[in-house]
Amino acid sequence: MWENLWYLDILINVLIITIFGLISCSSSATKSYDLKGCFIISMVGGVYDIPSAILWCLASLSILNFNGFFASLFLVFTWISNLFAMQSLNFLGIYLAFEMQSLCLLVLGKITANENQRWFAYRGLLKYLVLSLIAGSIFIFHASSSYLQSGVMISDSLVTYVFLLFKLGVAPFHMYTLELFSVVSRHVAFVFSTLPKLSVLYLISNSNIGSECVWWGLISLWLGSISQYQSVFVRSILLYSSVAEIGLVLLVLQEGFSWEAFSWVSIYFLSLSGVWHANSKFVSAISVASIAGLPPFLGFIGKAQILKSLVSINLGILIFSSILAATISFIGYLRLIRLMYLVSPVKWKNNKDSSFINWSTWMLTVGTLPMVYSV
């Protein structure tokens, strides 16, 4: 009973945020950043094992950061396509949902492209479109061939899994996103790194892939950590961080630990919103420290839950690999904090994100206390 009431409260909060964002998306008035606090409470307050609620929170926060009706409209279409993909029962529905998502993200990136980098953005978006069409064509051809042979409209084959990994952007399918992350706006980069991944993770958690998920997770974890260690630019570090953290999620997702996986995904997306959206280097540093897994921030609890789940099934090699890769990537996070402090000066006065700063700081620190009992 209490879980249903809690879920209803989450949906009401996020619905308020969505309605407010759609109403104020075309106005020039100052937005109420206290609504971002409602988003953060919804994100942390028990939505870990409810992927659709996390998707509501991400879409609502993204709407608040876009100006213009058409940008918000295509963002809503992206959210709808993700919900459709999560509820699809056959390969045709999955294919149509992901193609609709790719088209909406393409138009969203074109609308919000910077004037100085418009042609670079067009080139990156065109590469994203072409590669998405190639991957989708291979997937639909294989699925159609399987349907003609067996009469089954859903398959857990390797081709299906590779298609989902391509949409997830894990190693070695992350290279096409490197140029894209470098030219789009930071709000679009946040959408690219969060919204498309959640529906794919939900589909992988409900599939019967087997042990391949663990090996792909290890490859992504190590390749992302080493690349993050060698990167010297802010956006490339964040991209390789996404590859490494999603690889960590894949390690436990196919072992039956969906709650731990989506718990860490929710915490990671919350921390990532502080990195991309905050105008203060203080909030960005706290968010990066949370992603790195430093105590007493919320990310430490999320990674501790993943390590606890690996300990419970006696996977010592995976535990050692995860800790060693996290140590390597920690150096990249330290470099990221250093770059953030050197690039832009802090603005403590007249900061329009002051409410967002207070909410983010409070939830990434004090928000760890309710989760300590679950570790």
Image (cartoon, helix red, strand yellow):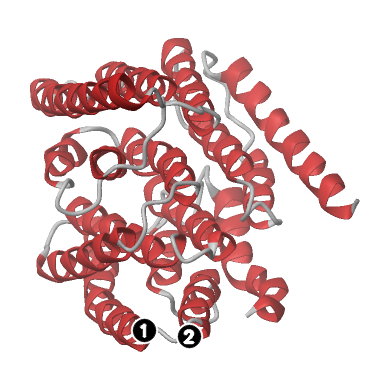
Q: Is residue 305 above or below residue 36?
A: below
The crowd level at tag 1 (other Cα within 10 Å; few <14, some 14-19, many 20+) is some
Residue drawn 25% across the image and 78% down it? 325
| Element class at badge 2 | helix
Residue drawn 22% across the image and 58% down it? 240
**Which quadrant would residue 296 be assigned to in this image?**
bottom right
For label 2, the residue is: 311
| Type of amino acid at the residue the image marks with label 2 | Val
Left or right of residue 187, residue 134 in this image:
left
| Type of amino acid at the residue the image marks with label 1 | Ile
> Does the residue at mark 1 contact the one at mark 2 (Cβ under 8 Å)?
yes
The crowd level at tag 2 (other Cα within 10 Å; few <14, some 14-19, many 20+) is few
Left or right of residue 138, residue 300 in this image:
right
Left or right of residue 21, residue 210 in this image:
left
For label 1, the residue is: 319
> Measured from the top left, where is residue 253 in percent x and y?
45, 60
**Which quadrant would residue 196 be assigned to in this image?**
top left
What's the mark number on residue 36?
none
| Element class at badge 1 | helix
Residue drawn 18% across the image and 54% down it? 171
